[in-house]
Amino acid sequence: MRTSFRLAAAAAAAALLTAPTARAQAPSAAATGIKYMRDSEEYASLSRQMYRLAADSVARRAQTAASGSWAVVLDIDETALDNSTYQLDRAAYGLAFENTSWNAWVLRREAGAVPGAADFVAAVRRLGGRIAWISNRDAVVGDATRANLRSVGLLADADRVCLQEPQRTKAVRRAELVSGSGTCAWSGTPVKVLAFIGDQMGDFPAADEHIADTGSDDAFGRTCFLLPNSMYGEWTARVTRRR
């Protein structure tokens, strides 16, 4: 009897030792994507690598351009500013993106810089280039956006910050910048854009915009430089891959 009891007790103890104290729940795909961008060295290295490649390309192309006659265009969110804290907060409560909470986050001015962004911006300025920020942030949060960019060493007084307003798509704002006319432009000063930096395909000119050296897949790695974004984008709701 005692031997049987001891064997049963030992088996029960072994089961307690090997069983988890609490059932672990597999993270959602959304949570995994957020963690990748917040915590992985792979993401940080990819971002720095992309910015180094972009800086090398700009340096080569700037050799034949006069100082002040050219610019680079950057998106803001997940290109220059890291908003993963907002995404983490929403995911923790099972909430989707919505504009009111997003603008409240922007007004907090707490986003950090994406790895590599500050070094790239500094390199462009040393080479004599201008910097334009073209973002789909609402124009009403313009002051907070400028303050946040400045707080992480990304904004200079001479930069253009072109935010979203009705009927003013990114394509419209890019056209203004290149032509030198419109509120996104340095007034009366057409510029050649040597590089576009973004994390979504909409951050880059389409073929029908007729901006030099853009509008095709061949532009990527040459004049268009794409950062990874595993947190959000049109790909989360539909198939966007064409080939």
Image (cartoon, rainbow, N blue to C red):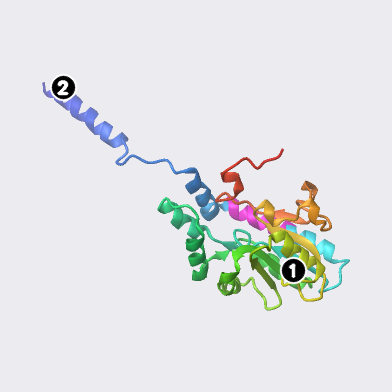
Q: Earlier in the sequence, mark 1 or mark 2?
A: 2
Counting from the top left corner in percent of width and height, residue 28 is at 46, 43
Q: Label 2 neighbourhood size at 10 Å, few (<14), some (14-19), many (20+)? A: few
Determine the secondary structure under disc 1: helix
Determine the secondary structure under disc 2: helix
Question: Is residue 136 among the parts visible in the rendering?
Answer: yes
Image quarter hosting the N terminus: top left
Magenta segment's dominant SS is: helix
Q: Label 1 neighbourhood size at 10 Å, few (<14), some (14-19), many (20+)? A: some
- Name the residue furthest bottom: 157
- Residue drawn at x 59%, y 72% is 142
Counting from the top left corner in percent of width and height, residue 94 is at 42, 50
Nearer to us in this view, 133 or 124? 133
Counting from the top left corner in percent of width and height, residue 174 is at 75, 63
- Name the residue furthest left: 1
**Residue topped by disc 2:** 4
Marks 1/2: CA distance?
78 Å
Image quarter hosting the C terminus: top right
* Amino acid at the residue labelled 1: Val
Q: Nearer the viewer, mark 1 or mark 2?
A: 1
Using the rendered view, name the quadrant where residue 140 is placed: bottom right
Nearer to us in this view, 193 or 222? 193
Residue 128 lies within the magenta run: no
In the picture, measured across the screen, residue 217 lies left or right of residue 228, that is right
Q: Which mark is residue 124?
A: 1
Question: Is residue 191 among the parts visible in the rendering?
Answer: no
Counting from the top left corner in percent of width and height, residue 175 is at 77, 63
The residue range painted magenta reads 42-53
- Residue drawn at x 79%, y 62% is 194
* Amino acid at the residue labelled 2: Ser
